[in-house]
Image (cartoon, rainbow, N blue to C red):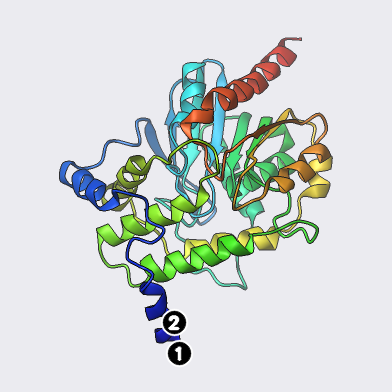
Amino acid sequence: MKSFIINRIKSIGRNAFMPKNVDALITEIKAKGPQEWMPGETHFTHNGNVHLCYETIGEAKRGTIFIISGLVQTLLGYPKHLHEGFLEAGYRVVRMDNRGVGQSSWMNNWSKENAYTLEDMASDVIAVMDDLNLPEAHIAGISMGGMIAQSVAINYPKRVQSLISIMSTGHLFDPELTGIPTDFRGQFTLITLLHGLNISTVDQRLRFRCATFSMFKGKGDYEMDIRAMIDKGLYELIKRSGYNVKAFDQQGAAVKKSGSRYEGLKKLNVPTLVIHGTDDPLIKIAHSKKYAPMIPNAKTLFVEGMGHDVPAIYMPQINAAMLELLASVEVEAIA
C-alpha cells in the first residue's frame, strides 16, 4: 500500500513544486563552482562538549549584531542582504552554525531522553560572545532563530542591547493559534515523497532544497532567488559539512520541549523589534501579533506580501526599521 501511494504521488510529475530552470541552473553553477559565501573570519569555540563554528564580518565601529538562523539552517541560512545594511552602517556581524548543523557539533548522541532545548541553544550564543570577549550585543533571530534570540534576552538580559525577532513566535504550539498549518505540512510531505527520498547525488540534494524553499514564498510581487539557493547549497555540500538529515527532528524537538516564552517576554526590558510577513505560510502572522504586545514598548513591522523569507524587495523598509532600533540604543546610552 505504501509503495502504491508513493508511486501515485510520483506520477504527479518530476517537476511538481519545482521552480523553473532549476536543472539548467544546477548544471551552470556546478560547472563554474559556487561563489565565496563566507567573506569574514571563521572561528571555533565550544559550550561544554558542544563545538561551535561562527563567523565575524566587519568591524565593530558602532557595535556588534549577532544574527541567529532558523530550523536546520546554517550560518548561511539567511540572504546576505539582511546583514549588509548593518555592515554599511558600521556594525560587526556575528553569525554561527547552531548545534546540529554546519560545522558545529552534529549531536550524534542525541535521543528524546537527552534532547536539547532552545535554552541550550541560547547558551551557545553566550559561549560565542564569551569567546569574543563581548559583554553585550544586539541579538537578531529568524524563525527558530527568533525563538533562540528571545531565549537569550529572557535568560541573559544584561548581555542583550536590543532584540530583533523576525517571522517567529513566542509559543509555536499555543493552542489558541495555528501551529504549523495543515496545508503546509501536506505540501512538505508531497515534496519529500517526490524529491526527498533516497537522495544520493548533489543534483538531487539541490533540487530538494529548491523545492522546499519554494514553499516559503508569500503572495507579494517578487521571485525567490533560486540561483543563490543553488549556489549556497553547493557551497555547503563541497566546502563545508553538508546537511545533517537528523537536524530537523532534533531542532524541532528543541522547539517543542522549550514550550512557551510568554511569561519571560512580558518581563523583558530591552528595545525590541518584531518583524513578520503578512503572508507567512509557515508561522502565521497571528503569532507575532500575539507575542509582540507582551513585550514592553516593542515595535512591530508587518510587511505586506512577505512570506517566510526575507526577499530583497522588502529590505529598504526592513533595514530602516532595524537600524532605527539600533540607533535608539546608542541615543539612550549617550543620554
Please identify the quadrant where the C terminus is shown.
top right
Q: What residue type is labelled 2?
A: Ile
Disc number placed over residue 5 in the picture, else none: 2
x, y (%) of residue 14? 32, 65
Q: Choose between 131 and 205: the one closer to the eye.
A: 205
Q: Mark 1 points at which residue?
A: 1
Q: What residue type is labelled 1?
A: Met
The residue shown at (44%, 82%) is 5
Q: Choose between 178 and 39: the one closer to the eye.
A: 178
x, y (%) of residue 260? 76, 55
Quarter of image, res 183:
bottom right
Q: Are marks 2 and 1 in contact (CB under 8 Å)?
A: yes
Relative height, residue 291 to residue 16 (above, below): above
The residue shown at (76%, 42%) is 289
Q: What element carries label 2?
A: helix
x, y (%) of residue 140? 60, 35
Q: Can residue 267 be seen in this view?
A: no
